[in-house]
Amino acid sequence: MTLAILATVALGIASGFFIIPQSIVPYMGTIINIGLCILLFFVGIDIGNQGDLFKKLKSMGFKILFVPIMVAVGSIVGTIIGGTLLSLPWNQAGAVGAGFGWYSLSAIELSKYSAQLGTLAFITNISREVMALMLIPVVARYIGKLESVAPGGATTMDVTLPVISKSTDGNIAVIAFITGVVLSSMVPVLVPLLMTFG
């Protein structure tokens, strides 16, 4: 799966350079959204085919929320440690990590404080999304299916959900979706909150 993703990205880059005319560029966002909707539609079908899936989720109850909470803690603590190495104030580094891969919102929020911080948030969180697309199949195969939810962060409800579904199963796909929803709802709260410190 990782090789397929890398090959597809490489093919896309080559097509952008040599084949796709500039006249199509303004429509690329719409084309990407349509493609993503089609992918998510088929993920939904796969989830729907899991007979007793929702009974299993109901039996888990609130324990399912430990997944997004631990992903959030790991993301923020990890960026604080990384920020320390770069001499970045802990609250700013934590705010960048609290984007959880949602690069557009975190970049906009942090640009209110400084253009440099907004740029750092954009680069960090878009890099997380790209790395997640490559790492999810590897993590699912060699570390664990549930652990493969962590790299995607907030994107597990949309962009990385098809990769998680392909690399794991319907049960994990639903947990990934819930994780993405919870983390996405935390971004607009945690990013400005962390900036109030320091």
Image (cartoon, helix red, strand yellow):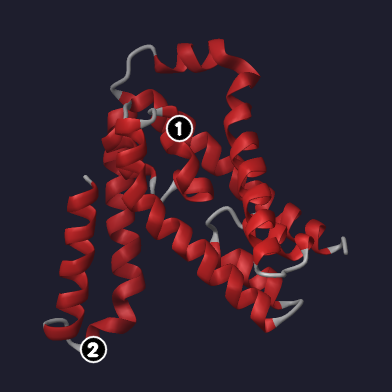
Placement of 194 over or under 178, stated as above or below = below
Relative to residue 67, is residue 191 drawn left or right? right
The amino acid marked with disc number 2 is Ser
Placement of 190 over or under 14, stated as above or below = above
Placement of 78 over or under 102, stated as above or below = above
Classify mark 2: helix, strand or loop. Answer: helix
Placement of 132 over or under 172, stated as above or below = below
* Marker disc for residue 180: none
Place of residue 150 in the rendered image (x, y in percent of width and height, measured from the top left): 49, 40
Place of residue 101 in the rendered image (x, y in percent of width and height, measured from the top left): 53, 56
The amino acid marked with disc number 1 is Glu
Q: Which residue is mark 1?
A: 147
Place of residue 106 in the rendered image (x, y in percent of width and height, measured from the top left): 63, 65
Place of residue 9 in the rendered image (x, y in percent of width and height, measured from the top left): 23, 64
Relative to residue 185, is residue 34 drawn left or right? left
Classify mark 1: helix, strand or loop. Answer: helix
Q: Which residue is mark 2?
A: 23
